[in-house]
Amino acid sequence: DAKTTQPPSMDCAEGRAANLPCNHSTISGNEYVYWYRQIHSQGPQYIIHGLKNNETNEMASLIITEDRKSSTLILPHATLRDTAVYYCIVRVASGVLSTNAGKSTFGDGTTLTVKP
Amino acid sequence: NAGVTQTPKFRVLKTGQSMTLLCAQDMNHEYMYWYRQDPGMGLRLIHYSVGEGTTAKGEVPDGYNVSRLKKQNFLLGLESAAPSQTSVYFCASSYEFQETQYFGPGTRLLVL
């Protein structure tokens, strides 16, 4: 699975859009980009995922560049409750057992702090 | 629909003691995972299971054993706890392998 690079921390003003970048320059054609977040002391929570098209759900939007080497998670109107660590992960497509199946799937992520 | 549950929520062990952490899911997921998370770090995969009766090693399996006797349960065992195993343990499950994973609330383990 491709390695991802995220900034260690970011701040965002409450009510503003939070844009969290992720680089995955070695991504393969059959690998999806997943985003999770972990609010303090809780289990990680799935946010969104995509292959090459932009995706949107009730929580966020995912913008993937045309070359798929980077992506951005957008929280359109950040609230204080969005303060969390956000993880960008690249995974192979469904049903395919990667040779890296036993490797860690979560790096250090980006700590997003939403400020009043 | 409880999702993924973990028991216990918190435990203190002495070095050398053994214990079993229980993970249960009611979503009929085939795949289950155990992770550990040390302070300020991301999650590291300990063991995983691709179905009832099967288990496989993850990135940091040493000192742990697992069993998946029933589809809905995934047990993580520590045979002889060590202070280095002090961590927060998260269980997860998914419908497809390593796709959208649903996590439990975690078990905080302190080994003295």
Image (spheres, rainbow, N blue to C red):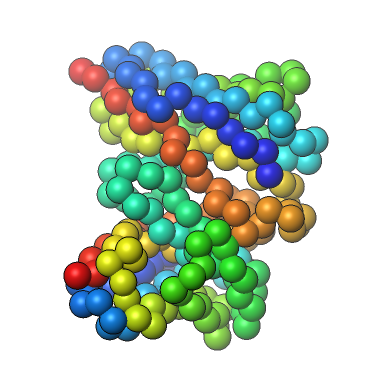
Residue B106 pos. (x, y %): 34, 60
Which quadrant of the structure image shows residue B68?
bottom right
For this rendering, which residue is in front, B101 or A8?
A8
Which quadrant of the structure image shows residue B70?
bottom right
What is the residue that sits farthest to the bottom in this orientation? B69
Q: Residue at x 62, y 59 (%)?
A: A102
Quadrant showing the C terminus of chain A: top left
Residue B105 pos. (x, y %): 34, 58
Q: Which residue is drawn at 34% across and 66% down?
A: B85
Q: Which residue is drawn at 55% across and 48% down?
A: A105
Q: Residue A91, relative to residue B73: is it above or below?
A: above
Q: Which residue is drawn at 32% across and 76% down?
A: B81
Residue A19: tell me if it is visible. yes
Residue B93 pos. (x, y %): 53, 62
Q: Residue B34, relative to residue A56: is it above or below?
A: below
Quadrant showing the N terminus of chain A: top right
Residue A54: tell me if it is visible. no
